[in-house]
Amino acid sequence: MFLHLGGDTVALKKDIIAILDYKKGISAINKEFMEIARDEGFVEIISEEGKEKSYVITSEKIYISPISCSTLKKRSVAGLMIE
C-alpha cells in the first residue's frame, strides 16, 4: 500500500522508517544526518518554502512534506492510502 506524502508523491508504507515533526527541530545527531543526506542527494523537498511540516524518512529518500505528522499517521492507520 502507498501513503500520499503531498503533491504528486507517494511512498510504500513498508518503506517508511520514520516521520518526524519539522517544526519541533531535530537533535544534533539527526541534524548532521540530514545535512549528509542533503549533500548526498537523498533529500527531496515536496513542500513549498515555508510550508514544511514533516520529514518522512524512507529506505530510498527523505521527503520534506507539507503534511503534518499527525495527518500522515491518521492516513496510514485509517486506510486512506492508495492501493
Image (cartoon, helix red, strand yellow):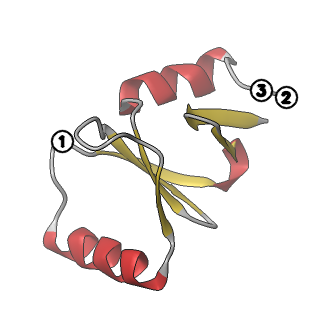
Task: Give the spatial CA distance, label 2 vs label 3.
Answer: 4 Å
Q: Name the disc covering residue 23, or none.
A: 1
Q: Quadrant of the C terminus?
A: top right
Query: Left or right: where does residue 11 sit relative to residue 26?
Result: right
Q: Which class describes the residues within 10 Å of circle 1: few (<14), some (14-19), or many (20+)?
A: few
Task: Give the spatial CA distance, label 3 vs label 1.
Answer: 27 Å
Q: Disc 2 marks which amino acid?
A: Glu
Write the residue at 38% across / 83% down. Answer: 39
Residue 27, located in which quarter of the rendered image?
bottom left
Q: Element at badge 1? A: loop
Given contact means CB atoms under 8 Å apart, are the residues at marks 3 and 1 in contact? no
Please report whichever mark, 1 or 2, sits nearer to the chain's N-terminal start.
Answer: 1
Write the residue at 62% across / 32% down. Answer: 4
Q: Nearer the viewer, residue 77 or 34?
A: 34
Please report whichever mark, 3 or 1, sits nearer to the chain's N-terminal start.
Answer: 1
Identify residue for label 3.
82
Write the residue at 62% across / 65% down. Answer: 59
Given contact means CB atoms under 8 Å apart, are the residues at marks 2 and 3 in contact? yes
72 relative to 21, above or below: above
* Percent x, y of residue 18: 47, 52
Q: Element at badge 2? A: loop
81 relative to 42, above or below: above
* Percent x, y of residue 14: 71, 49
Identify residue for label 2.
83
Residue extending farthest right: 83
Q: Disc 1 marks which amino acid?
A: Lys
